[in-house]
Image (tube, rainbow, N blue to C red):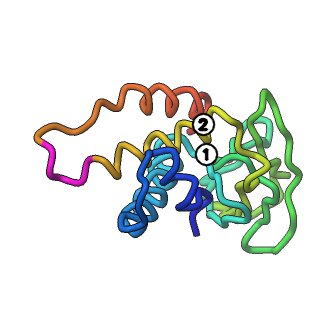
Amino acid sequence: MSYLDTATAREWARIAHREDDPAIAIAAAAAEAELELRTGWVVTADTERSQHVESYPAGGRVLAWRQPVTLAVDAATDEELDLVTINGLTYFELTGEETYPVTVTLTCGGGIDSVNALLKAALLTRVAQLTAYRGDDTAPPADTYWNNICAMMGKGIA
């Protein structure tokens, strides 16, 4: 399920009719998936992702590949790991007693409350671009704005 509802995206794209709602819904899901793949930022709440840790890291802290993280669990032992937030990025702490490699299940995404206005505007703009360009234009829309948002939101995320 997409964080962005179709009615809001339709308004943002200035589409007065509902005939394009299926395309808008697909574009919203695609924009959210693109944001996560390019930056690691998850906008939907309670999204589970796995992260593989090959060996014990120096200092015991591992940067979560997806942000924001609300829960990290060692998949082998079902034990919760401590979370530490540094400069707005969440790390999980390993004790060194785990059997490596370790797989950690991350519950991430803060839902609607975690999305700032800039990110919401960027997602809506991307949905409008994807909806407007569906292959019948000769050139795709410029995505400089989207690239800048992705670079900013992905700062420091692997």
* Dot 1 crowding, Cα within 10 Å, few <14, some 14–19, many 20+: many
Q: Secondary structure at mark 1?
A: loop
Quarter-of-image position of residue 157: top right
Residue found at the very far left of the displayed protein: 138
Q: Which residues are magenta?
A: 133-137
* Quadrant showing the N terminus: bottom right
Asked if 141 appears above or below 14 in the picture, the reply is: above
Task: Give how far across and how far down residue 136 sits, in percent.
Answer: 14, 51
Residue pointed to by mark 1: 41
Would residue 14 be found to the left or right of residue 119 on screen? Answer: left
Q: Are marks 1 and 2 in contact (CB under 8 Å)?
A: yes
* Residue type (three-letter) at the residue carrying disc 1: Trp
Query: Residue shown at 85%/52% (left/top)?
Result: 95
Instruction: Out of 87 and 128, give the one closest to the viewer.
Output: 128
Q: Which one is earlier in the sequence, the residue at label 1 or at label 2?
A: 1
Asked if 39 appears above or below 21 in the picture, the reply is: above
Residue pointed to by mark 2: 157
Instruction: Out of 3 and 104, give the one closest to the viewer.
Output: 3
Task: Give how far across and how far down residue 2 sits, in percent.
Answer: 57, 63
* Residue type (three-letter) at the residue carrying disc 2: Ile
